[in-house]
Amino acid sequence: MRHLLIAFSALGLGFWGLTTWDWQVAELIRGLIPIAAILFGMTALGAGFRAIPLKGASAAATPSDTPPTRLSPLVLKEDWWAIWLGLLVVGIGLISFFSGSMVLKDLAINPGKLKWQSIDELVVHFGDNLHLYFGQFLVFAAMFGVSCRIMGISLKDFLRGFAVIYLISMLIFAVGGWESAERFNLEPPLVALILGLFMANFLRLPPWLNSALRVEYYVKFGIVLLGATFPISLVVSAGPVAIGQATVIAIVTCMTIYHLSTRVFGLDRRLAAVISVGGSVCGVSGSMAIAAAVGAKKEHLYTSVTLVVVWALVMIIALPFVSQALGLSPGVAGAWIGTSEFADAAGFAAASAVGKMAGNEESAIKAFTLMKVIGRDIWIGLWSLIWALVATTVWNNERQPGSSLDKSEIWRRFPKFVIGFFVASIIVSMVTAGQDAQSFETLVKPNLLGPIGALRGWAFIFCFLAIGLTTRFRELKSVSGGAVSAFSLGVMVNVLLGYILSVHVFGDYWSQL
């Protein structure tokens, strides 16, 4: 009887909604047609790639949750999928912009800009735009879900987990849209991180949620979208400054951590190499690359990742407030964060926070991106090659006479998503080059760059929330004291050196961004 009551109530509510909101229902159905086509096309694309075996591959079926080895790295790596999906969004944005369509702006809807004063205003907003949020969720779920399935992740688990991530992210943006949010420092990135940490450490989360916690994937996708809002002229002009400063940071910090680890604390050389690059270049990605290059143990990688996450969390909170207390301009603060933070996602959160505190988020994010993404991330491939050479010729003496190190290691370890950043920047810069200053401000920014930036914001919130949800403090006790000490001393050197370079050596340049 209870089930019949529920059934009749649901049917009655549904028919009432069809008659009351007939126009909105019709618009929703019409809007779902292209979304369904995209989802079907991506599914067919994945099936097509699965059907193409590499040379010499067997025709045996691949287990559903195991990455299919027959596929090209172009569809097996998060870096490449971040590029394909990021450029797809950019392409849709350009078509929408030049055709006068509202598709991109509708997809980029975000409650974070509301400045609401009462819950009633928030309820009205979601009631009026529920179909847009539903369409946005479908697009994100289609892009990330299908690509993750091709990479060997359970589609069912991912979609369940991503639905939770999306709904929580929507609420986080809604909190950020509160009129008094800035007064209480309720910035969406920090709220996402703190909420994720609370949930991970005080609640029992279902195992299937882990399938949607794709920290690296979300931030790489967001970085490609960031490139679309980044003038290529700025990248070219700032390149020498960013790369020069990053080179000093990468070498000094890496050697400091390695020396302390091996000479002072007596750690394994492989562990020392992994944490030295993790603390000097690019956190988790750098740690994984060096672990593979030197043949490190699983626990070595875990130690480095744990230290990176802990210190990244500390600096997300500390650096914005310290920068504000020191009176640093947004550009200088962004560059300092770019030289001090070794995790892209954490750095973006800190740069965004300090920029909003100073009233110029764009300048802080530009400086951070130039310093971290363009300057430091390219060192992943270089350090991989160098440490692989050291491991095979000095540590293990495995290199045979006349043999040479595989120089393609640089390319294999190079962060491919950086390419997507450059390509997106070049495309948008070239297409909008003919716009005069007034048209750029009144047309290009609100109808193209703004919506792309809003979608980037969603990707970063997914990332920050995933960081919190994957960090469990009870697991930190397994990290040795020597590793903690060496890494922490390296962080201090990194932060101090980054401050000197960003404020006193290149301060005039960064302050002008």
Image (cartoon, rainbow, N blue to C red):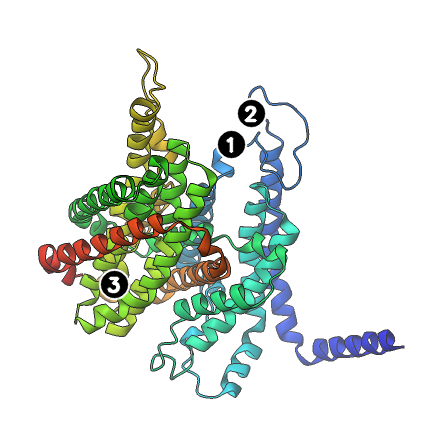
Q: Which residue is mark 3?
A: 364
Three-letter amino acid code at disc 1? Ser
**Residue 375 location, x and y as percent?**
24, 46
Q: Residue furthest right?
A: 1
Q: Nearer the viewer, mark 2 or mark 3?
A: 3
> In front: 500, or 295?
295
**Residue 291 location, x and y as percent?**
40, 37
Q: Residue at x 34, y 40 (%)?
A: 267
Precedes in sequence: disc 3 or disc 1: 1
Q: Which residue is mark 1?
A: 72
- Left or right side of 41 for 121: left
Precedes in sequence: disc 2 or disc 3: 2
Q: Are marks 2 and 3 in contact (CB under 8 Å)?
A: no
Separation (CA) of disc 3 from disc 1: 37 Å
Q: Residue at x 35, y 48 (%)?
A: 483
Image quadrant holding the N terminus, namely bottom right
Three-letter amino acid code at disc 2? Leu
**Residue 262 location, x and y as percent?**
28, 39
Task: Look at the picture and state if 8 lies above or below 301.
Answer: below
Q: Which residue is mark 2?
A: 54
Q: Residue at x 40, y 75 (%)?
A: 113
Q: Are marks 1 and 2 in contact (CB under 8 Å)?
A: yes
Neighbor class of circle 1 (other Cα within 10 Å; few <14, some 14-19, many 20+) is some
Secondary structure beneath label 2: loop
Count of residue discs: 3
Separation (CA) of disc 2 from disc 3: 45 Å
